[in-house]
Amino acid sequence: MWEYLQFASGAGHHRVALTMAAVVLVRLGIGSGPCAAEEGSRWQLGGPIVTYWAGPPLTPAVAAQLAEGGWNLVWAREHELDVAAQYGLRAQLQDPLLTPESLEDPEHRQKLEALVDRVRNHPALYSYFLRDEPNARDFPALGRLVEFLRERDPAHLAYINLFPTYATNEQLGTQGDVVTAYREHLRLYLETVKPALISFDHYHFRVEGDGEQYFLNLSLIREFALKYKLPFLNIVQACSWAPSMRVPNGDELRFLVYTTLAYGAQGISYYVYCWPNHVGGMALPDGSPTPLYHAAKLLNREFVAIAEELQPLASLGVVHEGSLPQGAVPVPADAPFRVEAEGRDCGGFVLGYFGAIEGPASHVLVVNLDYRASVNAKVRGPGPLEQFHPGQKIWEALGGPVVSVRFPPGGGFLLRSR
């Protein structure tokens, strides 16, 4: 039986408060083991991140299950860093000392400095966890902590996760309608805290229908990530924690993974892996994998392979064909790639365009927004098309600029024009 640390309700109605001392572990790149950062080097994303939020302590059995499932970011405590290294994982340290208050107390500051000195050369370390869903009034203090860590250990990320768009003005610490308040929250965060990565959470699946702001949230995060030249990570739903929320199935999980990729994310996280009083997730309390684990096992590897392929490219645009949810932009008449469903109406498509900065789109990630059914569609490109196969990490020539593709429920394909 896995043993759980004590927890309490956190900010918002859905979040576990992260009061336990823990470590988030990251293996960056398939088959690459951890390595200590060079002294004085600047943090770099490395390989795309696949992680979860809330899980058991990191034991060898848990680490093995996570590695087998394709996760490369896992929870642990400081003394479990060696377990991370053993399984080729790197770590984001979480510790009670990693708060702005530690800088204000001489004794705690000394302990924080000693902590950083202790771990910064550990081969498993990747980053430091600081805060979940801060209010804008917390940004100045968090900015000072980020600056402190960047000066003392520039090679490792200081990680903070943000609220979704459906947070209230009181939670965000900004005023106005949904878009106005959220844009100001993002602006203040990025200009005050100066993070190296944007992370946010958004939970879409309810018992009675889906949320209305999922694509709005993605579009706003993407806009600010491009403006400030930062990678971003999306924390998506993998459980139910309240009567109003449903547990996603494997097809709905695929929808979340592929739409996140289409908007240009370099990280995906699942809430939760396994946690008391949460239904679903990736594992049962005794450690047995759930059906979602087996679905994610494939999706995690597909996410990494596609995100790696897109990493050298710029996200040039995201458009929707068919239905237009909040935040969606319709396909323009002169779009370099288009998609048209064959044979029946469907829930529409999202097309993420990628290519060289200020150049024409050379790649497109097309996603079927109907997570209940497969759909046949024609994709048109500006030249002969090739399809990327994430399982083999190879490109296949399709023979012409117009191809017929069968999309799985909520799934997508990365294509390029040659």
Image (spheres, rainbow, N blue to C red):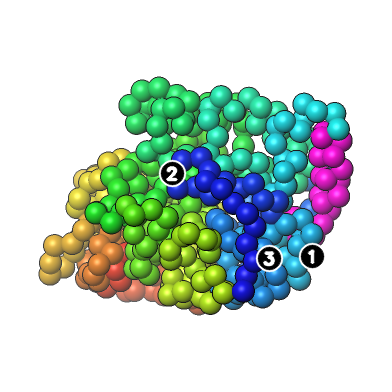
**Residue type, label 3:** Leu
Residue 157 falls left or right of residue 35: left
Q: Position of residue 336 (x, y in %)?
A: 30, 52
Instruction: Give me the disc on residue 58.
Output: 3
* Whole-number angstrom distance, CA of label 1 to CA of label 2: 34 Å
Look at the image and tell me in which quarter the N terminus lies: bottom right
Residue at the (53%, 49%) spot, across then down? 16
Q: In the rendered structure, which segment of residues is drawn in magenta? A: 108-126
Front residue of this view, candidates 15 and 8: 8
Marked residue nearer the N-terminal end (3 or 1): 3
Nearer the observer, disc 1 or disc 2?
A: 2
Q: Which residue is mark 2?
A: 13
Task: Mark yes or no: residue 10 visible.
Answer: yes
Nearer the observer, disc 3 or disc 1?
A: 3
Q: Which residue is mark 1?
A: 82
Residue at the (56%, 48%) spot, across then down? 8
Element at label 3: loop
Element at label 1: helix
* Whole-number angstrom distance, CA of label 2 to CA of label 3: 26 Å
Q: Main secondary structure of the magenta part?
A: helix
Residue 223 falls left or right of residue 215: right
**Residue type, label 1:** Asp
| Crowd band around label 2 with a 10 angstrom C-alpha radius: few (<14), some (14–19), many (20+) | few
Q: Position of residue 226 (x, y in %)?
A: 49, 39
As displayed, is residue 157 above or below residue 365? above
Residue at the (64%, 46%) spot, across then down? 19
Marked residue nearer the N-terminal end (1 or 2): 2
Look at the numbered discs 1 and 2 and tell me whether their residues touch, using CB distance below 8 Å. no
* Whole-number angstrom distance, CA of label 3 to CA of label 1: 10 Å
Front residue of this view, candidates 89 and 368: 89
Considering every residue shown, the one lying at the far top of the view is 175
**Residue type, label 2:** His
